[in-house]
Each structure stands twice: as C-alpha cells, then as structure tokens.
Image (cartoon, rainbow, N blue to C red):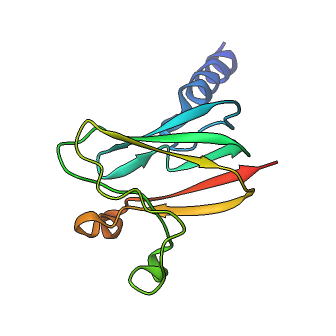
Amino acid sequence: MRKRFIHILLGALLLAGCGSTKAPAATGEGTVIKLSDMQFHPSELTVKVGTTVTFTNEESMVHDVNQLTVKEVGKTKPGFDSGPISPGKSWSYRFDQPGTYPILCTQGLHYTAGMVGTIIVTK
C-alpha cells in the first residue's frame, strides 16, 4: 500500500512539473513566454525552426528581450532586441535558424536579478 502511494505521489509531482521552468518542445505557429516575477516563464524553451515566440509582459514594469549572454552586455550588439515592452504588451520574434539563443532583460539590469533564459531552436 505504501509503495503504491509513493508511486502515485511521484507521478503527480511529475505531472505538475515540480516547479520546473522548462517547457516542452513547441512546434507550429508559435508559443508564449511570460515576463513575470522578474523571470522568463519558461526560462528554457525548445522550438522548431520557423516558430514564432511571443514575449508577453505580465508585470507592472517595463521589460525587454535581448539575444545576449550576461558576459556580452555592453560589449556586443544583441542578435535581436525587442526594445522596451510596456506592461500588458507583447513582442514576437520568429526563429528561422537552428541554434541556442541566450536571452535576457537589460531594463533596470533585470538580468542581474536572474531574468535570463535560453531558447533552443531545432530542425
């Protein structure tokens, strides 16, 4: 009986995602990353080439999305830059090339508080 309970509990935790901020692979027309709690939700996303990802700001402060690593901030031009995304607004980007795209928010140095993520684009 106890063994069965543990298996049920573990299954429920796996289904709930255990608080993970990773999302399953997205295909097709698009998917959404929420900008909230000074983080990207999910913080890691895998999509197929040609997928449009929409970044939606759900906070009361301005955010942005830049394709940069923390080490590149101020030294390298971002691969893409959303510009400021006001509260309640969205910005979209279509990923046409496979690769790994680090993202972060430079508004108010939010990346220093952990507002970083990764988008992995597969064929």
Is 52 placed left or right of 47 in the picture?
A: left
Is 32 placed left or right of 122 in the picture?
A: left
Asked if residue 110 is positioned above or below residue 39 in the image, the reply reads: below
Asked if residue 40 is positioned above or below residue 52 in the image, the reply reads: below
Residue situated in front as seen by the camera: 85 or 10? 85
Task: Name the residue rendered at 32%, 70% in the picture.
Answer: 112
Q: Position of residue 101 (x, y in %)?
A: 60, 61
Is 73 placed left or right of 86 in the picture?
A: right
Q: Position of residue 121 (x, y in %)?
A: 70, 51
Asked if residue 21 is positioned above or below residue 110 in the image, the reply reads: above
Q: Position of residue 22 (x, y in %)?
A: 57, 44
Task: Name the residue rendered at 50%, 63% in the picture.
Answer: 80
Residue situated in front as seen by the camera: 42 or 4? 42
Q: Quadrant of residue 4?
A: top right
Q: Position of residue 44 (x, y in %)?
A: 56, 50
How many labels, in total? 0
Of all residues, the one furthest to the top in this rendering is 1
Q: Quadrant of residue 91?
A: top left
Of all residues, the one furthest to the right in this rendering is 123
Task: Name the residue rendered at 63%, 18% in the picture.
Answer: 8
Of all residues, the one furthest to the bottom in this rendering is 75
Is 88 placed left or right of 100 in the picture?
A: left
Residue situated in front as seen by the camera: 22 or 81? 81
Task: Name the residue rendered at 66%, 12% in the picture.
Answer: 1
Asked if residue 97 is positioned above or below residue 48 in the image, the reply reads: below
